Amino acid sequence: MSFNQAVAPPRNPAARWHLAFESLSPHASPCRYLTPTRWAAMRENCLDFIDRFGGQAHDLGWTAAQLFGVHPDHGTLRVDYCGALVVGIGTVRGVETERVLFTRTSAYRNRPGQEWGPTIWEFAAKAG
């Protein structure tokens, strides 16, 4: 590869998701009403999920927006547009066809009328 050639992004969706989260600062919340402390925990939980279940989630048909989406204008303030990892609290213990399992709760992707917002990294890029 020559010096001038750009490095192509990974083809693996989970690897792309991981890179997108790595590009977001753990200290600066991408959403106005998401505290830096809550953001840091969410970011770590998302990276852990991607490392352990990202490939499986993709194979089950989960999209980036269904996992990491936020409202296009209000970020995490409007949870009706948010993805499973944005509304879920804590470490993920499993992923299934229609739900992500957390220690005490689950987040579903098959809610009637659900609209998914852009991913949190797309939201951050637009706001930045």
Image: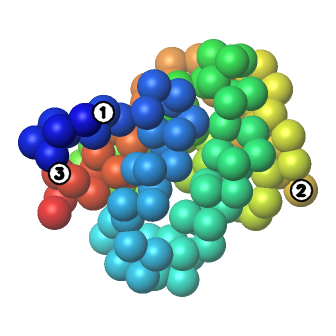
* Amino acid type, mark 3: Lys
Quadrant in the rendering for residue 119: top left
Query: Which of the two discs, 1 and 3, sits closer to the camera?
Result: 1
* Amino acid type, mark 1: Ala
Please tell me which residue is depicted at 66% across the width and 37% down the height of the picture. 54
Please tell me which residue is depicted at 67% across the width and 61% down the height of the picture. 45
Q: Nearer the viewer, residue 114 or 8?
A: 8
Colouring method of the image: rainbow
Secondary structure at numbered mark 3 = helix
Q: Are marks 1 and 2 in contact (CB under 8 Å)?
A: no
Instruction: Tell me where residue 81 appears, x and y as whole percent.
Output: 45, 39
Q: How many marks?
A: 3
Point out the tag, 1 or 2, that comes first from the N-terminus: 1
| Gap in angstroms between the C-alphas marked 2 and 3 | 33 Å
Instruction: Tell me where residue 99 appears, x and y as whole percent.
Output: 76, 31
Quadrant location, the C terminus = bottom left
Quadrant location, the N terminus = top left
Point out the tag, 2 or 3, that comes first from the N-terminus: 2
Q: Is residue 35 above or below residue 17?
A: below
Residue pointed to by mark 1: 8
Per the rendering, the mark at residue 126 is 3
Per the rendering, the mark at residue 103 is 2
Secondary structure at numbered mark 2 = loop
Q: Is residue 105 above or below residue 26?
A: above
Instruction: Tell me where residue 10 appears, x and y as whole percent.
Output: 43, 33
Decide if residue 11 is on the left or right side of residue 62. left
Decide if residue 66 is on the left or right side of residue 27. right
Please tell me which residue is depicted at 54% across the width and 83% down the height of the picture. 37
| Gap in angstroms between the C-alphas marked 1 and 3 | 22 Å
Instruction: Tell me where residue 29 appears, x and y as whole percent.
Output: 38, 73
Q: Which residue, as the protein is rendered here, is positioned at the far left? A: 4
Please tell me which residue is depicted at 38% across the width and 64% down the height of the picture. 24
